[in-house]
Amino acid sequence: MRTQCAPQKTAVITGGAGGLGLALDAGLRQAGWSTVLIDLPGPSLEALPAVKGRRVFGCDLTDASAMSRLCAQIRDDRGSIDLVIYNAGITWIGACADLSPEAHRRVFDINYFAATEMAQALLEDLRRAKGTHLAISSVAGFSPLLHRTAYAASKHALEGFFKSLRSEEKQYGVRVAIAAPSFVATNIGRPEAKSNGIARPGSATDGVDYMTPAEAAADILKGLQRGKNMIPVGRIAWLSWILNRLSPALFERLMERNISAGRAKRP
């Protein structure tokens, strides 16, 4: 008698062309998933080798029409979408006095609106699959972070959206999880900062106790497998999560001291 194999599950990962996105891709494919990577068209995406079980698409997710067309294309190509990881993001580093309205809105366009609008576009797909939304937030999503006003605000908003979505989607058998890494060394030495303060994620040199993308991805996937709704990623994230809940004032003092010390060490 022939046994039927379970269909291969599909994960969609935004910001998939490097760093944490690629590490999550590797971990999921090793566990038997097929993956769909989405990132901005360009050299980083084009340089990705063709590998079994992975499709790659270029798209500016802040273009709502392009994003909607891409979701339809993935739906037609894959049939079932079981996990969506909202990982695309940028950072903004600098004093609030220097934050321009354009930079502020750009951070929200990518970190918040691109994720939330894609989540809306794929609601029915994940309901059919009884799948999972996984938002990649940050320690800055549940606590303050010096010289990151726009970034912290966008991640706080992201967490508010997905925590609220969790209550709505529970009735459909859909999970909503949030992962909050501390400092992940994805682009150290490659900030490519714009004049408005926007920079690549993971490029800051004032961070504390950096993790590698592979370490962060392993923690995230382990938390997901264990059914965790909130996944602080790494030692610093766990300490921050606990301390910020017990004593926000003490967390703030320690955060200011450590980040200021990191900035002082910058070349």
Image (tube, helix red, strand yellow):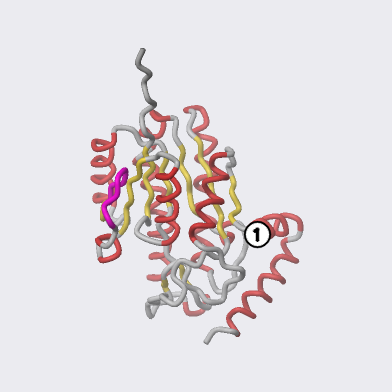
Residue positioned most to the front: 1
Q: Which of 246 and 204 is in front in this view?
A: 204
Say which amino acid is labelled 1: Arg
Q: Which of 73 and 224 is in front in this view?
A: 224
Residue 46 horizontal/vertical position (percent): 24, 61
* Quadrant in the picture for residue 209: bottom right
**How many labels were placed on the picture?**
1
Which residue is rendered at x = 56% and y = 58% of the image? 181
Which residue is rendered at x = 40% and y = 50% of the image? 25
Residue positioned most to the top: 1
Q: Main secondary structure of the magenta part?
A: loop
Q: Is residue 204 left or right of residue 52?
A: right
Question: Would you place residue 54 above or below residue 241 in this image?
Answer: above
Residues in magenta?
49-56
Q: Is residue 264 left or right of residue 174?
A: right
Q: Nearer the viewer, residue 49 or 186?
A: 49
Which residue is rendered at x = 36% and y = 36% of the image? 81
Q: In this view, does 117 lie to the left or right of 46?
A: right
Residue 232 horizontal/vertical position (percent): 60, 53
- The magenta stretch spans residue 87: no
- The magenta stretch spans residue 50: yes
Specify few, some or many for label 1: CA neighbours under 10 Å numbering under 14, 14-19, or 20 or more.
Answer: some
Which residue is rendered at x = 54% and y = 36% of the image? 167
Residue 180 horizontal/vertical position (percent): 56, 55
Residue bearing the label numbered 1: 235
Residue 36 horizontal/vertical position (percent): 32, 46
Q: In which quarter of the image is the N terminus?
A: top left
Helix, strand, or loop for circle 1?
helix
Question: Would you place residue 243 above or below residue 9 in this image?
Answer: below
